[in-house]
Amino acid sequence: AINGKLENKVIAPLILITFIENVFKYGISNKEPGTITIELRAYDDSIAFFTRNKLYPYKNNLESTGIGITNTRKRLNLLYPGKHTLTIKEDDGYYSVHLILQS
């Protein structure tokens, strides 16, 4: 879902791609139904991005180096120093990412 006025809102190219890729890589199963959530909300002084997906125990066997999120954290620190908040949680069988970019 996309909400808010996106006119004159700019973010670094591909800064969200790792989070979106991970939602599809780890949050979809061909063994059982599940739901993924991807939201982008524009506010006057910020952009909020949110993803949420179910954690599937048999997906833990996928090779995960964490390099994508590590590199994205580095890019955020370079491009949005002191102007972003990134919260990543595993809670109650779900994985969520909440990123706020301040203008």
Image: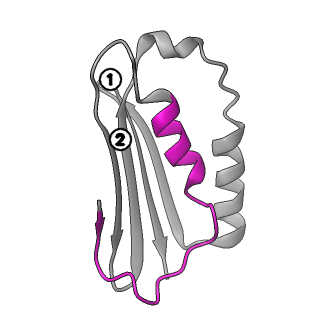
| Image position, residue 27 (x, y; %) | 41, 30
Question: Do the residues bearing badges 2 and 1 touch, measured as CB atoms within 8 Å?
Answer: no
Q: Considering the numbered disc 1 on the image, is that residue within a helix, a strand or a loop?
A: loop
Is 30 displayed left or right of 1 in the figure?
A: right
Nearest to the observer: residue 80 or residue 9:
9
Which residue is at a point 39% across and 23% down the rendered structure image?
Answer: 55
Which quadrant would the N terminus be assigned to in this image?
bottom left
| Image position, residue 40 (x, y; %) | 37, 63
Which residue is labeled 1 in the image? 93
Which residue is at a point 45% across and 49% down the rendered structure image?
Answer: 87
**Among numbered discs 2 and 1, the one appearing first in the sequence:** 2
- Whether residue 5 is in magenta: the answer is yes
Is 91 displayed left or right of 79 in the figure?
A: left
Characterize the local packing of mark 2: few (<14), some (14-19) or many (20 or more) Cα atoms within 10 angstroms.
Answer: many
- Residue type for callout 1: Gly
Characterize the local packing of mark 1: few (<14), some (14-19) or many (20 or more) Cα atoms within 10 angstroms.
Answer: few
Nearest to the observer: residue 36 or residue 72:
36
Is 87 displayed left or right of 76 in the figure?
A: left
- Residue 48, by quadrant, is bottom left
In this view, 1 is above or below 19: below
Which residue is at a point 64% across and 62% down the rendered structure image?
Answer: 76
In this view, 83 is above or below 91: below
| Image position, residue 102 (x, y; %) | 47, 76
Nearest to the observer: residue 40 or residue 95:
40
- Residue type for callout 2: Arg
In this view, 96 is above or below 27: below
- Whether residue 9 is in magenta: the answer is yes
Foreground mark, 2 or 1, reads 2
Which residue is labeled 2 in the image? 52
Task: Measure the alpha-carbon separation of dots 2 and 1.
Answer: 10 Å
Q: Which residues are magenta?
A: 2-25
Q: Considering the numbered disc 2 on the image, is that residue within a helix, a strand or a loop?
A: strand
